[in-house]
Image (cartoon, grey):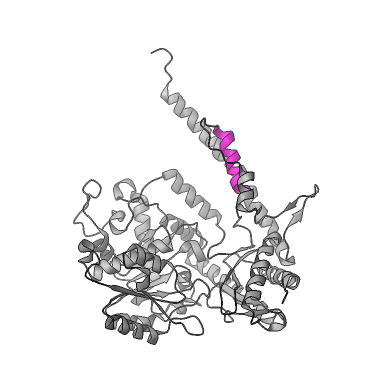
Amino acid sequence: MGGATNPSVDLHQSLDRAAELIDAVKALIVPFVRAADEAAPLKATGNSTVTTASGEVRNALVDEHAPEALVAKFKLQLPDEGRGKEGALELFEKVLKYSVNTWDQGFMDKLYSSNTPVGVIADLLLSVLNTNLHVYQVSPALSLIEKLTAKQFAGLFGFTGPRAGGVVCQGGSSSNFTSLVVARNTLYPETKVVGNAQHDFALFTSVHGHYSVEKSAISCGMGSSNVIAIPVDEFGCMIPSALREAVVEAKERGKTPLYVNATAGTTVLGSYDPLEAISEICKEFNLWMHVDGSWGGPAILSHKHRGKLVGSHLADSLTVNPHKMLSVPVTCSFLLTPDIKVFHAANSLPAGYLFHSVGEEEPWDLADLTLQCGRRGDAVKLALAWTYYGAQGFEQQVDHAFNMAAYMAGLVDRSADLVLVSSNPPPCLQVCFYYAPGSQVSDDAELNTRTTRTVAERLVARGFMIDYAPGEKGSFFRVVVNTQTLSGTVEGLVKAIQEIGREVWKP
């Protein structure tokens, strides 16, 4: 017919444009990462900003603006008519310009850090494949990688039985939530059909446990008030005797004790709960023992630090996030178990339009083991990194990170203006401390909080981004080092905090 276009020609042109677009994006990404690398040597001075010949002050970490100001600068307008390559690159460049550059040494704010080159290609591979890991038929290679990687990972924690393994979830909160669903449906199978009506479930976690436990209880219809917070000792570790007392008390009040969340690397102090003692109580009362090792779990890769996780093999389920300590791209969270068939029994439902391998001994349709149907192949991020670095390379990285945390804790401990909240060395990679002239923490909590917040805000202009947390005497600094942190970075950060602290301290 006259005027008709040839679809194959259009497709060919689209592929040409796609290749051109990818090359153009690479030209933007490489300078973005390089800017962070070039700023690294300056961190030791306590200020990594640079002034160009034109007088422009540049900060590789972030071009910071308040939300309203960023809205005005961004001028995001989603068009009716496509703007093609030019429009896409313009938006891509804006996102880079106004985002936090986590490749920068100064990013020490949260429990994750820089990506790596091998991480970038892992995400690229997943985007190219754009597959869904719900059934094996459409994702054979990635399904195999997830099962085998999870099995080997589980083995590190002592899950060595023939059905040991795990699945990947969207993040640590999702893994923890899934563990609670599995616990309930396994210990009380009728709930899978009739719900919680016959039980007033009680869950237990330390006062330093992650808030995802409460969110999981809410999502499961158990209510946040049924999450019982267990006291911790001076090091931030759950007190087993207090746990046992809480379980007994819950039973006396007519509740059904169900689930204990033990933490391996708490969010603020990085503490590791005593897993063996907690396991004894779980066995005594037939409770599901979950270990939230989202943050501190990768210490298992280090011969020097794996003792922090003694007793992990006793858990019924365990969360660990390679996207945190191992610098694998966000998100990559594993929920591991001694017996993958338990996950299958707890989560599977008949869906003949999707799952066609019903009755097979080895479950390969991975969505039949999880709460998700749409699933990304995040396990390949760990598999590629493990292949690239090896377990020995991971061990060296983990040991380096722990060494840097200990080094920074020592710097803080020796300072006349700072007082450690963390132990020295700290249990994990967080270093927590107050600004305290004369090594005396003020009793004025409001003063401490104001000082901490102001110092943290002013650090950004110097190329450092750290966080803070509430404490008994007001908020204190929480600095998170990582596997790529350099000694000069922590030296410069301590110097910067001392300098800014002297400027803003106003009793």
Q: Report the side of 504 relative to 266 (left or right).
A: right
Quarter of the image where the N terminus is located: top left
Residue positioned 23% across, 45% down in the render: 353
Residue that lies at the very extreme toward the top in this rendered image: 2
Q: Position of residue 471 (x, y in %)?
A: 56, 77
Q: Please state which of residues 446 and 211 is positioned toward the viewer in this rendering.
A: 446
Q: Position of residue 167 (x, y in %)?
A: 35, 60
Q: Report the side of 429 relative to 384 (left or right).
A: right
Residue positioned 60% across, 39% down in the render: 90
Quarter of the image where the C terminus is located: bottom right
Q: Position of residue 289 (x, y in %)?
A: 34, 75
- Residue 24 appears in the picture as rendered: no
Corner quadrant of residue 194? bottom left
Across the whole image, how many numbered discs are drawn on residues? Answer: 0
Whether residue 167 is in magenta: the answer is: no
Report the magenta residues as a range. Answer: 81-97
Q: Is residue 242 above or below residue 86?
A: below
Residue positioned 64% across, 82% down in the render: 443
Q: Position of residue 269 (x, y in %)?
A: 53, 75
Q: Report the side of 488 relative to 240 (left or right).
A: right
Q: Is residue 17 above or below residue 287?
A: above
**Is most of the magenta stretch helix, strand or loop?**
helix
Whether residue 87 is in magenta: the answer is: yes
Q: Please state which of residues 382 and 189 is positioned toward the viewer in this rendering.
A: 189
Q: Report the side of 453 relative to 385 (left or right).
A: right
- Residue 222 appears in the picture as rendered: yes
Residue positioned 32% across, 82% down in the render: 247
